Amino acid sequence: MNVIGYLRVSTRDQDYGIEVQRQLILAEAERRGWTVEFIEDHGETGKNSERPGLKRALGLLARGEHDALVVSKLDRLSRSVVDFGNILRLATRPAGKRSRTWGLVALDLGIDMTTPTGRLLAHILIAVAEWEGDIISERTRAGLVEAKRNGVRLGAPSRQDPEVVAKVAALRENGATLQAIADVLNENGTPLPGGGVRWYPASVRSALKAAA
């Protein structure tokens, strides 16, 4: 199996550097007969979903050039439940016609989407991420209602659905990219304020402005 070994280190990591991660992945690769290409992100936080290395890795996986993404610890990939759920969706339900499914392996937790049990676990984790997103959305919506009650202007309520605005704001707060938010809204069939049927990063940005 041809895999990507994803390595990430932030400026605060002192005892879990790139080489420690690399050796753990190499040991597993030798045990299981994998061919590994390593992709690194230096000085990047796990809450930043726009990391250049991660974006490159996801692009290679979507094009079918590798079979799986391997991390030594799950927090190397993401520290956001919602963002992790978005990555799992990309692995199990590719958005583009030419995109392919791929596996995710997190050595520290024993998550292995290259197996039937691992794929089942991935779907459970996606459900948990969606639940977390809904909980955050509920809290954000309650905050918007309270702000409105106190006379705070909440953007353009005549066009933007407050519930959609709250969900968009919650996803963004938890590190989701504009494109990832658009993908979630499109997947759920969420209508645009102007009556359109497809969300794009620009339309997501407009919804965020309404939440400001």
Image (tube, grey):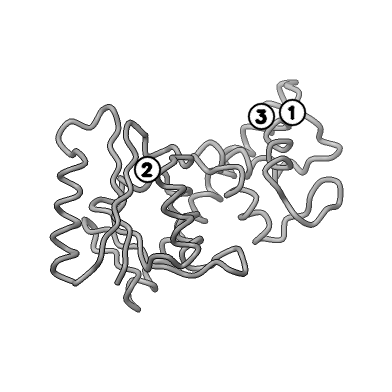
Q: Residue at x 19, y 64 (%)?
A: 29
Q: Is residue 58 left or right of residue 3?
A: right
Structural distance between the alpha carbons of marks 1 and 2: 29 Å
Q: Position of residue 16 (x, y in %)?
A: 18, 39
Residue 79's tag is 2
| Kind of residue indicated by mark 1 | Leu
Label 3 neighbourhood size at 10 Å, few (<14), some (14-19), many (20+)? few
- Look at the picture and state if 79 lies above or below 60: above
Secondary element at tag 2: loop
Structural distance between the alpha carbons of marks 3 and 2: 29 Å
Residue 146's tag is 3
Secondary element at tag 1: loop
What is the quadrant of residue 185 in the picture?
bottom right
What is the quadrant of residue 43 in the picture?
top left
- Look at the picture and state if 23 lies above or below 94: above
Residue underneath mark 1: 154
Do the residues under discs 1 and 3 have CB atoms within 8 angstroms? no
Give the mark, 1 or 3, whose residue is nearer the N terminus: 3
| Kind of residue indicated by mark 3 | Glu
